[in-house]
Image (tube, coloured by chain):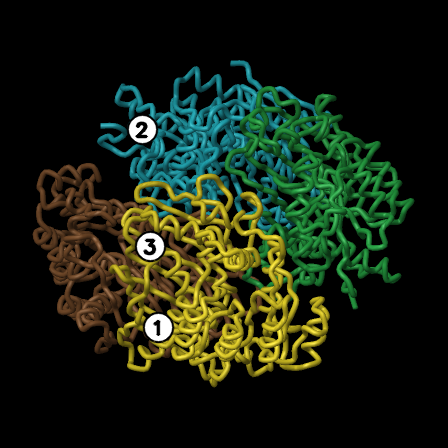
Chain colours: A brown, B cyan, C green, D yellow
């Protein structure tokens, strides 16, 4: 029986205490498909907040840890220890935490961008290869059925060879120096020590980069970037324009911005091939527009008949009943559960559960960022982004 | 602390076994906000399916009941018995099941339409009044933040007095005699014995009627209906046009259809007042269009600043991260949990949790249906729809 | 050579002086395709305004008439007299003016609604039959290529038998008592002496009625109406809901309103047949959405390949270059010119030029209005709308 | 009296014979507002087609010229000679023709891109300065009221300082080697001898560049381009990505493509400032979306109250009655007529009529193209695009 098992998997979390947006998202996502129970956490560096957050989440007091190092050791030692840990801290700490849990033999679900340096990224790649554990990177937009449909259509050559990719992720919430007001979400995202060397490019640009590679199945091989900081005093860029060249000859443009008023969460991708084009936008994720040359564009809907199995499989409710951000996120949790359950059962996982972004995808995302920084620093030059295999 | 408590509430379910769409929806909805644990069920009239369904949902074998009568008695007798039952069977059986659980002292969450006859509806109204229990009717669209925003705007007179209401709920999935193919969802919905005297009007029209009353805060006082059956041999209508007159003088139109190709789940409401109008569509539920006379229309987004508290409260993730059908459904489960938790704690529930449709709303929905049938049978005449208070 | 001739046709106009919206529209529409030259007019009842208006339009002083009776006689007597007159006065005067020009042997292009009484309407039908002249009624929305595409698709049974028609024409500009401010366009439209017995139903509802019949090719046989007046003191309705029954069994709803904030000029039609549905909205007229059962909806574009000839013929610029209100209006002028040129040349007109609404369409539109008034006055009853053939 | 005069202006045309798309567009545009009469032409290099085209356009035989050199001389010598010539030939011939008419003292209306070399462009700049004649470049999208509204809003600092500009103009009609089929429109556009050194960048990219400068009021000072040719054998690029830097610090991206399936004529601009953003798309030109930070986006409509005079002035029919491509084009003809009429009358033109793109705009457009070619040839480097003043 694909992807189900006698028990729910046990999930722990590092970060994500009260007031943290993304931790609550991970927990909701984990609950939706009922494959996980949330049982342990080091939810905050502040012990009181850690304790209160754990209690609110019905975590037993003895599994509400003050520190993730302690948690990794203690959970590894329990017979009923966690199957996986979700890491939802600021970017800069992902590496150390992920290493600790991998070294303790615990599968990892990690927020993006994976790390803030290439060295850290490559170290995680090595650790995952060494341990053979599951490492899931929550580029959550890949969980949308219509994103998977888009990927399957490109893979099935329904567009012909890909020529042009336009991908963008504009937001507006950092148009003013919000970080100066003490807003916590803003503060760490523009702090190079916590977020890494870039702002919008890491926070949302890496999603756009990943989405472009996920949908097209093509790797970005070279890029040329123009980074800009518009809010005075901000130490990281808040708007980036990046030219892309893909393996096989496709060209692309990537735009990330957090200073573009009117854009809430404007992730959007358009892919044009020899014979057809497609368009998907995150804010209306249940639709996928597909246009074949010489034909009227069609609006495909999540849940309709005739979609690729990868899309149909990722669907919970029928066509016309919109799924959203949490459901896409849940798909990564469901697929990761399938992968882990297969390991536990000693069988091969369903290939359909293997679309979850991996540690290698994470490393490419970090390389995307560092290459953009290099390109810009050199005055705008083409930079190679390929990784040694 | 509003709406949280030491333990999750215990949920049981009647109907909703494997293959049933709406049962799985209820369980996902109950999980999202972590206020419920699912512990008991009479999930199918087929004992094997009941058992398998329960196992899949991690229900203990002794709480996987073959029969809802047994379940009501057994759960009422347990110290750790269910706090509430969700009834997700075909319409015709709602009344008997709901009565059994109410009589056993168990709160009820019931699918719509509430019953298939006015007598049954009024009997449930009486039973709820007598027992003082919570009765939540899952007109799930009322759980959408932007629907609650719309209601709050009308209530705050931001549109002036309401003049015109256009509400519709077209679908296309019954455009052909799908019931003749043995498709189970179709079969019971067009069977008067299970679904009641109407087809589209009960299945989706009651949602439209409820939404119109919910958003405007006005009662439909009179209606005039033109029912039609387009698929040959179908014993119930599959397309209905209904003229509405509201208390206070507003006029409206309601259209329900299951034979209109291109419509997946097209619930849409438009409300026009003296000074402004608004529009909301179920398939893109995170937006609400509001137009004040003489001004450019504005597109309000779920999660943005400046919304009414009733909308903000019903929001999980920030603006630009779409919520959908399950999250709206979850809101009813969250609010119902708040109501029940308050009862358990012996305190007043948060008034904000009281927007969940009630047994009286259910009775008005049934009256809407029976009045439409009367109007049509009389050749299209205005029929009074008010209930004795 | 279809539709061209050695000379431009000569056009006169009654009404449409400076400050009148629709007169200028007719003249622009007549110019776009270069089949007409504007040479004569009785442009205003105010002699000074008539003279100034004529001069501005480059009309020779001797053909700037103070009175339409004089104009009809004088133009009929000239060797270079007008080929056709455009009547763009308030509704109440259409009949007398049209009769005068028909009696003078001059073709007529008349604004809608055609007349304010059935007697006047039938008299014009008789006059047109008697004289054999061209009578074009400017239901301008029928000139849109995608409306003609919709009609051709229905006629070709691409939707199967029509079941449901939803048509509406809401506006908001009369939400307040604008007529009390002296605004001229508002004043005559709510004056029964000039506009007839209804407000929104005549001004915009007749367009909706005509569009429903034009697209479906079906006649409205019965209707049931609920008329309302929301602005205090207004002597005509400003919001109307009408149930429709078409020949052949299709059902429909028609809504006209001038008190619905946020609606500029919201004419929209949806037609649902056994196997497909379509939707067209006036404010984005270059697109037509078509959905076949079980397939993804397609967005057809004006000018694309594969459309019906009736649509392609009515197109000036390529796909993606939007045409609008004036171009649709121009299409009626182009087709009417083709009809008249064929008469002059003594040949049969191109059947493709015969889609222009006729005097019979006008009579059905007037009957639609009077039947709605009758239905409402009787408390909401079904009224027959068929005309004797 | 602004912009009107006793007579219509006399227009001639070079190019634009039967079968040519853009010539017919210019003539329709010239007719709409009734400021021009079309009286002379050298409509084709093929004498038979020239003669037939002239006859169809009601041009007197003696003013149907076989050659534009003859036409320039003859019309300059007539007392009733043309006031202006419209040049609608392939790009490569614009310069010689424009020079001939300027030298003959005749105002020029010229299609874009203005020339295929900088030398030619600068020569025209000099000629216009020397002669003092009107030179209107038909970047027709600047004629849209909502584009003028956007420009006026930026100029009034309603967005704050501009930070980011995203402009694009994708099409799909050259996704296949259409030129190889003998299709005339395709053939000259990909022929460097007729179209210049680029394909999409000249044909549509120059519109995008002009629109960005027009709306923002800012000059592009530097660019970096990545040109690509996807259709094998095509001698010019068919997809271009260009990074932009504007005077004052704004950054931008420009994308032109003729190989992106599903895009008909997808010109779209988004401008983001410190406090607000706006978006306009050519295919739905009557709307302009404006979002102020922290407020719900508003959809402004052509013709609504409260717009800037520059937008209101360019409007013919009320809000809700869509204008399109031809009306925007007509606006350039109307404004150019106002400019020329003012010269004839010896008065200053209405400043509002001065928004028509000029010969300097044309030169900047050509520099945009040549700079992009240089940038790409150098492997992707930043190139200065400023012109000597």
* Image quarter hosting the C terminus of chain A: bottom left
User: Which chain is disc 3 placed on?
Assistant: A
**Coordinates of residue C76 in the picture (x, y in percent):** 86, 48
Cα gap from disc 1 to disc 2, whole angstroms: 49 Å
> Is B279 placed left or right of D273 in the picture?
right
Q: Along the horizontal axis of the image, is B83 left or right of B117?
A: left
Q: Quadrant of the N terminus of chain A?
A: bottom left
Name the residue nearer the viewer: C138 or C238. Answer: C138
Counting residues from the N terminus, which is met first, the one under dot 3 or under dot 1? 1
Residue C41 sits in quarter: top right
Q: Is residue A43 above or below residue B159?
A: below
Q: Which residue is labeled 2 in the image?
A: B338
The x, y position of residue A225, in whole percent, is: 25, 68
Relative to A251, B277 lies left or right: right
Q: Secondary structure at mark 1?
A: loop
Q: Position of residue A383 (x, y in %)?
A: 23, 75
Instruction: Tell which tag, 3 or 2, sits nearer the viewer.
Output: 2
Where is residue C336 drawn, in percent x and y? 76, 54
Q: Nearer the viewer, residue C354 or B132?
A: C354
CA–CA distance in space, label 3 to label 2: 29 Å
Q: Which residue is mark 3?
A: A334
CA neighbours of label 3 inside 10 A, class few (<14), some (14 to 19), many (20+): many
Residue B63: quadrant of the picture: top left
**Callout 2 secondary element:** helix
Q: Quadrant of residue A240?
A: bottom left
| Residue assigned mark 1 | A218
Q: Nearer the viewer, mark 3 or mark 1?
A: 1
């Amino acid at each position: 029986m694909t992807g189900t098992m006698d028990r729910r998997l046990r999930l722990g979390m590092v970060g994500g205490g009260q007031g943290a947006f993304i931790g609550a998202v991970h927990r909701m996502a984990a609950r939706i498909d009922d494959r996980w129970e949330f049982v342990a956490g080091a939810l905050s560096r502040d012990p009181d907040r850690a304790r209160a957050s754990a209690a609110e989440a019905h975590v037993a007091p003895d599994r509400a840890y003050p520190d993730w190092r302690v948690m990794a050791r203690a959970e590894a030692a329990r017979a009923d220890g966690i199957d996986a840990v979700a890491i939802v801290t600021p970017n800069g700490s992902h590496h150390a935490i992920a290493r600790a849990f991998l070294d303790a033999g615990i599968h990892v679900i990690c927020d993006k961008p994976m790390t803030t340096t290439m060295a850290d990224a490559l170290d995680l790649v090595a650790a995952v290869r060494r341990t053979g554990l599951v490492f899931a990177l929550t580029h959550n937009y890949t969980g949308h059925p219509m994103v998977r449909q888009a990927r399957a259509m490109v893979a099935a050559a329904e567009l012909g060879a890909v020529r042009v990719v336009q991908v963008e992720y504009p937001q507006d919430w950092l148009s003013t120096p919000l970080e100066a007001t003490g807003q916590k979400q803003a503060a760490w995202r523009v702090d190079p020590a916590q977020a890494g060397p870039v702002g919008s490019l890491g926070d949302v640009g890496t999603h756009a980069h990943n989405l472009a590679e996920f949908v097209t199945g093509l790797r970005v091989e070279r890029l040329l970037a123009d980074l800009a900081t518009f809010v005075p005093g901000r130490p990281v860029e808040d708007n980036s324009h990046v030219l892309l060249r893909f393996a096989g000859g496709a060209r692309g443009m990537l735009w990330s911005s957090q200073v573009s008023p009117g854009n809430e969460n404007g992730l959007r991708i358009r892919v044009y091939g020899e014979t057809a084009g497609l368009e998907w936008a995150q804010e209306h994720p249940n639709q996928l527009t597909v246009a074949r040359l010489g034909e009227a564009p069609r609006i495909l809907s999540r849940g309709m008949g005739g979609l690729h199995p990868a899309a149909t499989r990722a669907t919970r409710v029928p066509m016309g009943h919109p799924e959203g951000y949490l459901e896409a996120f849940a798909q990564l949790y469901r697929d990761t559960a399938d992968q882990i359950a297969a390991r536990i059962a000693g069988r091969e996982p369903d290939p359909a559960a293997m679309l979850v972004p991996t540690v290698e995808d994470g490393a490419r995302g970090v390389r995307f960022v560092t290459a953009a920084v290099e390109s810009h620093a050199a005055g705008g030059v083409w930079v190679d982004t390929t990784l040694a295999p």
